[in-house]
């Protein structure tokens, strides 16, 4: 009797899991397996794939444009990851002060609303903002005696343009995670520290940072992965230019796959990016136990 009940519970559980498992198999599992196979083939969609062994691997290591785009992606990582992680925290700390709920709701709306806006639509507006000749940003800079800046035409300025757009568009994600983490910290801890005579700075380093470390870790992991996979910002703002100055790895994969129709090599490029992200994420998790505090007692 007990065996039959256990078996029926298992069947019911599998039935509930079936939609999610089917979705995973069709839209995640199958594409992953297909990518692994296509990485070792020559395939242009129009003709059957041909097994080429390690030819795509050799092409990958000899592809100078790939290493250029990896260098560009590394620059995005160096700029965007600390920007979102640090500025998002500072904004969340400012909003989490002792202000009314109405003001907090307004600030949450202001900072998170750009995340909900369509990237392609707002990118058109930002292209006009960054325009060298009649952009509103250069107009206001000119009021301070600053010469027009070629935001999208100069390799020296293009990363700052992408960073400004990325800050406006996506800072709301990090801000909201931090705000939720700050609001989950027990107020009694701050009250006890204040009674003991701890200053606001001491309370920040002794209470806020340790208690917020799981959220900081989550933001760092997701932001770093997002920076390594960056596509929308350079594609919509600069189109990878000037030249290849702002072209990311993801943009190069898109170009190889859908402009050159070399799906085999594009799959190998995707596999290389996946392995790199996997290694970086494993390293992050392996060191997380040294500074992330999950104890809230």
Image (tube, rainbow, N blue to C red):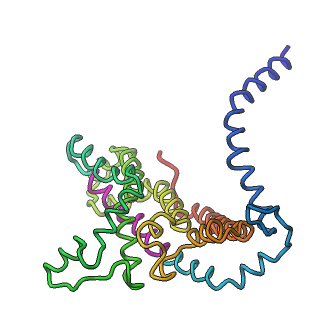
Q: Residue at x 46, y 68 (%)?
A: 81
Q: Position of residue 281 (x, y in %)?
A: 61, 64
- 222 vs 243: above or below: above
Q: Nearer the viewer, residue 125 or 34?
A: 125
Residue that protrudes farthest toward the top in the picture: 1
Q: Residue at x 63, y 79 (%)?
A: 66
For image coordinates 75% across by 61% down, the residue present is 46
Q: Is residue 290 left or right of residue 157?
A: right
Above or below residue 295? Residue 272 is: below
Residue 122 sits above or below residue 62 on the image = above
Q: Which quadrant holds residue 45?
A: bottom right
Query: Can you say which quadrant of the picture contains the N terminus?
Result: top right
Residue 84 drawn in magenta: yes
Where residue 57 sits, quadrant-wise, is: bottom right
Residue 243 is situated, as x and y percent measured from the top left of the image, at: 49, 83
- Dominant secondary structure of the magenta stretch? helix
Is 210 included in the stretch rendered in magenta?
no
Q: For this rendering, which residue is in front, 271 or 97? A: 271
Where's residue 238, x and y in %? 43, 73
Q: Nearer the viewer, residue 29 or 202?
A: 29
Q: Nearer the viewer, residue 156 or 242?
A: 242
Residue at 72 percent of width and 53 percent of height? 31
138 left or right of 264 in image? left
Number of marks in the image?
0
For this view, does 168 lie left or right of residue 285? left
Q: Quadrant of residue 49?
A: bottom right
Asked if residue 189 lies left or right of residue 67, the reply is left
Q: Tell me the magenta residue range.
A: 76-96
């Amino acid at each position: 009797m007990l065996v039959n009940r256990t078996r029926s519970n298992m069947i019911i559980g599998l039935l509930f899991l079936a939609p999610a498992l089917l979705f995973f198999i069709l839209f995640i599992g199958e594409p992953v397996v297909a990518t692994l196979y296509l990485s070792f083939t020559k395939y242009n969609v129009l003709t059957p794939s041909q097994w080429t062994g390690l030819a795509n691997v050799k092409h990958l290591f000899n592809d100078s444009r790939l290493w250029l785009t990896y260098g560009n992606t590394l620059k995005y990582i160096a700029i965007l990851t600390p920007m979102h992680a640090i500025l998002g925290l500072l904004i969340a700390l400012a909003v989490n002060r002792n202000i009314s709920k109405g003001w907090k709701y307004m600030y949450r709306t202001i900072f998170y609303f750009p995340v909900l806006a369509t990237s392609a639509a707002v990118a058109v507006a930002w292209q006009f903002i960054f325009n060298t000749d009649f952009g509103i940003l250069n107009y206001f800079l000119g009021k301070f005696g600053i010469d027009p800046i070629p935001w999208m035409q100069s390799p020296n300025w293009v990363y700052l343009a992408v960073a400004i757009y990325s800050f406006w568009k996506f800072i709301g994600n990090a801000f909201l995670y931090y705000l939720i983490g700050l609001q989950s910290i027990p107020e009694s801890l701050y009250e006890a520290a204040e009674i003991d005579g701890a200053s606001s700075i001491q309370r920040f380093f002794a209470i806020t940072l340790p208690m917020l470390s799981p959220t900081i870790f989550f933001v760092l992991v997701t932001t770093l992965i997002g920076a390594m996979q960056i596509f929308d910002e350079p594609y919509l703002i600069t189109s990878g230019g000037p030249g290849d100055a702002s072209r990311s790895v993801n943009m190069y994969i898109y170009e190889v796959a859908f402009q050159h129709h070399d799906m085999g090599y594009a799959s190998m490029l995707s596999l290389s990016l996946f392995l790199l992200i996997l290694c970086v994420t494993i390293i992050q998790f392996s060191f997380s136990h040294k500074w992330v505090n999950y104890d809230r007692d």
